[in-house]
């Protein structure tokens, strides 16, 4: 087969506008981002929490992934990337019809005009079908919701969570996505959010912290002692998260182009630098490296580089990694312990620090370090630049601050109103009997057939029978699957 035949038009399945390379990369990037959530964060959440909450934590992530997809295609995609309804919101409509999905992808409100009304940047129309773009953007919406869940693990009523997911997607996520990516007022103002430092990380961190306040804390015993039930499995989930980020930032240009390559390289540089910085600080101040700390540092590095991955130079990615490995470390390890407000709100996995602080930091650093040539490769407002490059860079930094303030304010208000509405019908926090028992009471299932959280086997304490091998099942008032404890 000659090259012209392989890459040429072949109606009806290969129209003249279809670029097979771009389409293949975009579907690959979509799959990588989806794997970050399912199974990446499902595994990470199920293993980083106390054993009695492993099933519940994993299920919250699994449910969110499925529920977001259905809401996305029924209504939310076009609220975030469709025709303009308000300066910060698109018109909701289904993205299900064959005629809509097989047509060329496009973001209708992305045409950017000069002040005199002439076109500066034409409509963003990638060279693949709308179905590819719909799914790619779904994976971003899903991971945002799952990151938010990290703030309320270990006590949120699962029924309240099931109601919260679609409501927050509709009334919060779509607003940030349209405003910054879909052709809303911040997009046309020239705010830089390359791949979701504000849309995803800042919003999930602020909304998660707000939700943690309204849901209430875990049991006192859980707050005081919450060891991960499987550190090695936690690392497996973290590995999927890290490797999947190449699709996260590499897919943001909607094309397999040179900016995509820059973004993938910068993403990994920042993550590695941040992980090493966080680990170094752990060794200096606590005398030993922490595996959980390394995972936290990895996350902050990935979150920080996201708003600028394709518009900063690689040396700047190192600078951002150093900042993301140190500033969130300080807010989590030092400031959190001294702040009355932060102590009062039970943010289970510290999403405020690992995502809100890191995402905000990345957005502001992008306003300082965005390189003019790289900006012109991807941004709708040409000649954008960070403050360190002179010109209009100072104005860019101010735009980043205003956009962050909008995202923070919207998520505080919308999340509060949604949860106050839900709690009229459904309690936000589990009842005390479920909080004491955990997974078996909530789901009738347990993750492991093991003894207590974090305990090592002690024959004098755990051996219930004199035989070398014996089986013991623990009676429970709750019907459901029970594990078998093997007494060695």
Image (tube, grey):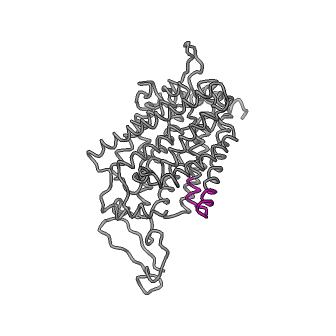
Q: Magenta residues?
A: 279-296
Q: Nearer the viewer, residue 480 or 24?
A: 480
Left or right: 101 as drawn, with respect to 253: left
Residue 126: name its quadrant.
top right
How many numbered marks are there? 0
Placement of 247 over or under 277, stated as above or below: above
Instruction: Name which residue lies at 54% across and 35% down.
Output: 132
Residue 21, quarter of the rendered image: top right
Is residue 280 covered in magenta?
yes
> Which residue is farthest bottom?
466
From the viewer's perspective, is residue 17 above or below residue 325? above
The N terminus sits in image quarter: top right
Question: What residue appears at the point 47 percent right and 40 percent down from the top-left corner?
Answer: 203
Q: Position of residue 352 (x, y in %)?
A: 48, 47
Report the predominant secondary structure element of the magenta stretch: helix
Q: Residue farthest to the right? A: 2
Q: Is residue 312 left or right of residue 446?
A: right
Rendering coords of residue 249 (x, y %): 60, 40
Front residue of 335/81: it is: 335
Residue 263 seen anywhere in this rendered image of the structure = yes
Q: Is residue 24 visible?
A: no
Q: List x then y, in percent, for residue 142.
A: 47, 43
Residue 179 falls left or right of residue 297: left
Residue 24 % position (x, y): 61, 38
């Amino acid at each position: 087969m000659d090259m012209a035949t392989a890459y040429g038009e072949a109606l009806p399945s290969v129209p003249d506008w279809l670029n097979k390379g771009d389409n293949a990369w975009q579907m690959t990037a979509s799959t990588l981002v989806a794997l970050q959530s399912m199974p990446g964060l499902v595994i990470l959440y199920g293993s980083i929490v106390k054993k009695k909450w492993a099933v519940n934590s994993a299920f919250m992530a699994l449910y969110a992934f499925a529920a977001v997809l259905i809401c996305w295609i029924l209504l939310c995609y076009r609220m975030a990337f469709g025709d303009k309804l308000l300066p910060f919101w698109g018109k909701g409509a289904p993205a299900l019809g064959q005629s809509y999905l097989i047509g060329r992808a496009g973001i209708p409100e992305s045409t950017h005009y000069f002040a005199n009304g002439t076109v500066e940047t034409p409509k963003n129309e990638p060279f693949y079908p709308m179905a590819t773009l719909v799914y790619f953007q779904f994976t971003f919406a899903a991971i945002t919701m799952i990151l938010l869940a990290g703030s309320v693990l270990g006590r949120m009523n699962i029924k309240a969570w099931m109601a919260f997911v679609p409501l927050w997607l509709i009334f919060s996520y779509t607003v940030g996505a349209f405003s910054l990516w879909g052709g809303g007022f911040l997009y046309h103002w020239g705010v830089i959010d390359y791949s979701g430092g504000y849309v995803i990380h800042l919003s999930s961190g602020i909304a998660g912290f707000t939700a943690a306040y309204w849901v209430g804390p875990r049991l006192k015993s859980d707050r005081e002692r919450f060891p991960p039930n499987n550190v090695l499995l936690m690392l497996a989930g973290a590995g999927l998260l890290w490797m999947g980020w190449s699709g996260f930032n590499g897919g943001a240009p909607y094309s397999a182009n040179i900016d995509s390559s820059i973004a993938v390289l910068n993403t990994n540089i920042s993550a590695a630098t941040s992980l090493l910085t966080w680990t170094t600080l752990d060794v200096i101040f606590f005398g030993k490296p922490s595996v959980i700390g390394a995972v936290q540092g990895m996350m902050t590095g990935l979150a920080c580089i996201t708003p600028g991955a394709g518009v900063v130079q690689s040396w700047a990615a190192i600078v951002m990694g150093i900042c993301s490995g140190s500033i969130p470390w300080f807010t989590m390890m030092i400031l959190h312990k001294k702040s009355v407000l932060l102590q009062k709100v039970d943010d289970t996995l510290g999403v405020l620090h690992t995502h809100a602080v890191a995402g905000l930091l990345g957005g502001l650093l992008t306003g300082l370090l965005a390189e003019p040539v790289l900006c012109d490769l991807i941004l709708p407002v040409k000649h954008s630049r960070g403050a360190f490059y002179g010109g209009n860079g100072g104005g860019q930094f101010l735009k980043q601050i205003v956009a962050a303030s909008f995202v923070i304010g919207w998520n505080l208000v919308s999340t509060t109103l949604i949860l106050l509405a839900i709690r009229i019908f459904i309690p936000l926090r589990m009842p005390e009997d479920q909080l004491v028992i955990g997974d078996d009471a909530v789901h009738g299932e347990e993750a492991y057939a093991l003894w207590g959280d974090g305990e090592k086997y002690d024959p004098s304490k755990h051996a219930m029978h004199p035989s070398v091998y014996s089986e013991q099942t623990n009676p429970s008032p709750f019907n459901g699957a029970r594990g078998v404890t093997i007494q060695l």
